[in-house]
Image: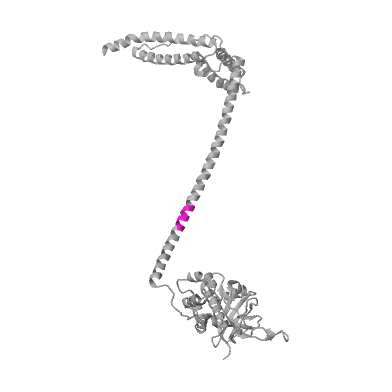
Amino acid sequence: MLKIIQEWLAKPSGRYFDGLAIFTQLASPDIKKKYLEYFGQVKEEPKQHDIHFTMLINKVSAIAQNVQVNPKAFENIELVLKEIGPDTATLEAIELKNAQIIELKEKIELLKSENEDVLDENSELSDQVEELESDLGTAQGEVSEYEEKLEELEKELTALKSKRGIQIMAIKDMPEDLQKRYARIQEITPLMGSIHSQISVEALHPSTRKKLVKQLCELDDERRQNWDMINDWSEGKTVEIKVEKQEYSADPFVAGAEMIRRVLKLQENLKNSQATFDGADREVIKINAQKRIDAYKAELAELEQKLAPAKSETDAVE
Amino acid sequence: MGGYKNFVLLFLATHFSAVPTLPATQVTEADFVTAAGAFTPKTAGAKPIYIECTPGTVKYSAPSQGEIEGQSFAPAGEFYRAGDKAAYAAIARKYNNTPCYLVVENMDGKQIMVGQPGMECNLKFEFDGGQKRADRRGYKITYGTDSVSPVIYLATKVDIEDLLAES
């Protein structure tokens, strides 16, 4: 027995499973319990510096020592070396399993990489969502700021209204005559600026300057007069509203077309004045609006009367 | 026939968790000088470094050392690797002052282990580039350790053919 073990120990390379047979048959139960499963993991002949192999050599060396020291303990054991290596079918199964494992590992790697991509994308999207949320928060803050400002302005407006007794109105709410005056102010202002700059030229002849100064004064008077009228109207003072009479062409066809345009314009004016009347909170404004409404209605009735015979003639022809 | 085969195996002490050891109990004469077991790597893949030497340059001797009643052996030797390749210089730099075990093989095929756990072998590398054109250039490596035994044979030899086939 000792000879067999020593022969194996002298040249164990390429004979792992013989060594395993020696270990299985001669190792103590405790040692077997500890190492047999580990040594059994080897399915193919390992290299000489494989950890399993070198540990097996160490254990068999210890067994050889025990056999030498206490040969009686091993007397009744007949040591048999046998091939414990796997058969062809097992080897094929192992190869198949190994191939499957490699394939699965590749799949896992692929999935890992895909997962990383998805995670990256997810984190990018999360960042974007965070950014958008932050933008939204800022925008909401701005909106609430503007709302507060608006509220303040409304309060100020109300205070001004109650304090000064004026009514803030849009240009379209003004009577047609005042709208024209407002437009004239818009024209006059740059003209005055131009005249001012002409006057400032030192080389200008005094007589020319005099003319320009006169013109400037006239424009200034006109502007002041226009503003006074607009201010009077906005403050609710009674203003004489001029509703210009439209003159129509001598040609009946052209006149008809002009009348129709005038009817449409009057209808729009009526609508605006009615809105002013409904929305006004001061009696004077209501009165002025009513005056305009009456004037528009009268002109409208007159025009419709003029247009009526023409319409009946057209119906007769048809 | 004296002398040793022209190779040396270098086992770095830090790469092996267990190495062959002299048995605690000796039954036969051989047990006094035969280390049982194998070099067990700490991690899979760790192997000895095979150093091919210039023929006739591997030397091993074990002179006595110490005083009377305290005598032991000082196994020591040297080997030579001709050439000035960068790889040799790298080995010299890497393993200088590195504790290790050496294995040399005598002409009878017995492998001798130099160094034991706790008394590892120490290497000393020297490079000589020569002077004349006819001179040899290369590395002389001297080694030494202490031991109670003048020589320690390996019970389980390292299979050199397998080792070379693996690398």
Q: Nearer the viewer, residue A284 or B162?
A: B162
Q: Can the viewer see residue B167 in this picture?
A: no
Q: Can the viewer see residue A126 in this picture?
A: yes
On whether residue A115 falls in the magenta region, the answer is yes
On whether residue A180 falls in the magenta region, the answer is no
- Can you tell which quarter of the image residue A304 is in? top left
- Can you tell which quarter of the image residue B60 is in? bottom right
Residue A122 position, x and y percent, is 49, 47
Residue A279 position, x and y percent, is 51, 15
Classify the position of the C terminus of chain A by image quarter. Answer: top left
Report the coloring of the rendering. one colour
Q: Residue at x 43, y 60 (%)?
A: A104
Residue B68 position, x and y percent, is 73, 87
Highlighted range, magenta: A108-116
Q: How many marks?
A: 0
Most common SS among magenta residues: helix
Q: Nearer the viewer, residue A223 or A215?
A: A223
In the displayed structure, A156 sits above or below B60; it is above
Q: Residue at x 56, y 74 (%)?
A: B40
In the displayed structure, B165 sits above or below A144; it is below
Residue A317 vs residue B124: left or right?
A: left
Q: Nearer the viewer, residue A304 or B40?
A: B40
- Can you tell which quarter of the image residue B115 is in? bottom right
Residue B23 position, x and y percent, is 60, 80
